Image (spheres, rainbow, N blue to C red):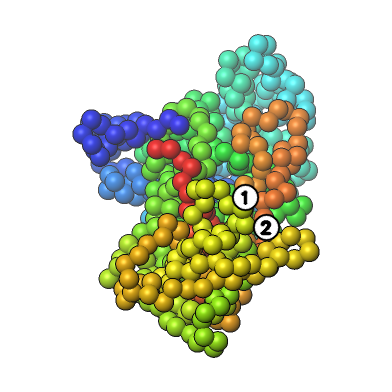
Amino acid sequence: MEDNSKATAAEGERINNFLEDIIEKDLSEGKYQAIQTRFPPEPNGYLHIGHAKSICLNFGLAKKYGGKTNLRFDDTNPVKEDTEYVDSIKEDIKWLGFEWANEFYASDYFDQLYEWAVVLIKKGLAYVDDQTQEEIRKGRGTVTEPGVNSPYRDRSVEENLRLFQEMKDGKYPDGAKVLRAKIDMAHPNMLFRDPLMYRIIHADHHRTGSKWCIYPMYDYAHGQCDSIGHITHSICTLEFDVHRPLYDWFIQALDIFPSHQYEFARLNLTYTVMSKRKLLELVKNGYVDGWDDPRMPTICGIRRRGYTPESIRMFAEKVGVAKRDNIIDLSLMEWCLRQDLNARSNRYMAVLDPVKLVIDNWEDGKVEYFDAPLNPADPEGPSRKVVFAKELYIERADFMEDAPKKYFRLKPDGEVRLKYTYIVKCVSFKKDADGNVTEIHCTYDPTSKPGAGERRSVKGTIHWVAVDHAKEIEARIFDTLFTEEQMGAIPEGVDYKNYLNPKSLVITKAYAEPALEEDKSGIAVQFERVGYFFKDPKNGAYNKVTGLKDTFKM
């Protein structure tokens, strides 16, 4: 993992990443009085964890240097965009803890962008092309061969102005004509080979309705929209590096506010795909339960699973700002979540794979209550009551008939402490015809009551719930959505869906202590010795957010 937010020799001190160096230089030289950033999503899908990194970066830089961040929707393709996506994007940004200074849309600037296109036509820098999409593609040439001029490239300014106006007026069908910039069909950067500026799309726009039937292309609209907003530092992911010279060309040709683009490495996670197209396919074809499926890398998906905004902001900071693409281990994101939840989450006992334990020398019908802290990190803080009785559930994995020497959980003639309560000793057990243990019988040591009995310890402590008082819950155990660690390295032509994990979701019935029902914390809770679980706001099941063990190595 490459991280340009390194620690200096002074322990805990942090030095700037390359974007912070650029901004501080610009401010110190008086290039800008204040910085202005923007987050510019296209409303054609739900945001994912990669967008979360970009959000944290854009908003974080503006906050650090006393600037502002605008939210600007690049809504230039009416066929793929919808207000559903606009609303979800705004919800995700707010959930992450950020507020934008202004809310804009590329469609706010359609009139200005059209006027600037007319300016470029008048300067002889744009023309209307009648070629088909396939003819234009072939005419661009290759990386080793120059392109071929369009037969319509030398139309007069007057003819281009008339045709462009007729395009705007709806005279031509989709695909009949496009507006192209006139630059250089032999340019080594193929994006300069007369790039498309406008195409005809007869479709209603989610904001402008039927006013327009021509829509600007991304490479034409993006820089100009930045310029209108006086964006000082237009921060994009690395794949837009090759687009930057064209971004600058349009701004210089129009002689408008010189916004400038800077690129950083996009976030790539192990066992994950970030392509909106692929994520949309998973949703549409029912491979997942919608955009907010807890296995999805979408922000709404990780929110539903139980991640906290604090953990995602921490993750973005840990990943840092790199100058070249890299792949981040998913376990780092889980590590950040544990760091946050360990300090804040309430603890409860729940048994996911139960086997009954009967305390033979406990009086029938007798119950006893024990105080247990909601969070051991705050021993003076609030506690909950756990009820203890004759019949309990323990985890099946916490009993072993033929245990190895260093097995410190329950075994025949062995002792363990039942968490918060007594030490018990296994005296017998029952099995069914298939050899599965169905019931374990123990005796308890009444002198081992914590705080009141003899000071005696055993090496094993296990959790439990009382059978007659436990609450039945549904637990959903998640694994990675894909089985391949490096999803980005799958060979061309191989279907990424071949790597879908058939065990990415396991649903099981579990039993929890009754105090769980009273939890009002709003964040994931820890099922002691099991993992962190979050109550799904849609179905009431308890989603396993992450386990207790760290696999990430700092």
Q: Please name the residue that numbered disc 2 is placed on.
A: 506
Q: Is residue 136 above or below residue 30?
A: above
Other-residue count near label 2 (Cα within 10 Å), few / some / many at <14 / 14–19 / ≥20: few
- SS label for mark 1: loop
Alpha carbon separation for disc pair 1 and 2: 9 Å
Percent of width and height locating residue 33: 25, 41
Q: Is residue 263 visible?
A: no
Q: Is residue 540 left or right of residue 458?
A: right
Q: Is residue 375 left or right of residue 460?
A: left
Other-residue count near label 1 (Cα within 10 Å), few / some / many at <14 / 14–19 / ≥20: some
Dividing the image into 4 quarters, which one contains the N terminus? top left
Residue toward you, 77 or 333 = 333
- For badge 1, the amino acid type reads Asp
Residue toward you, 528 or 222 = 528
Percent of width and height locating residue 413: 54, 62
Residue toward you, 324 or 305 = 305
Mark number, residue 335: none
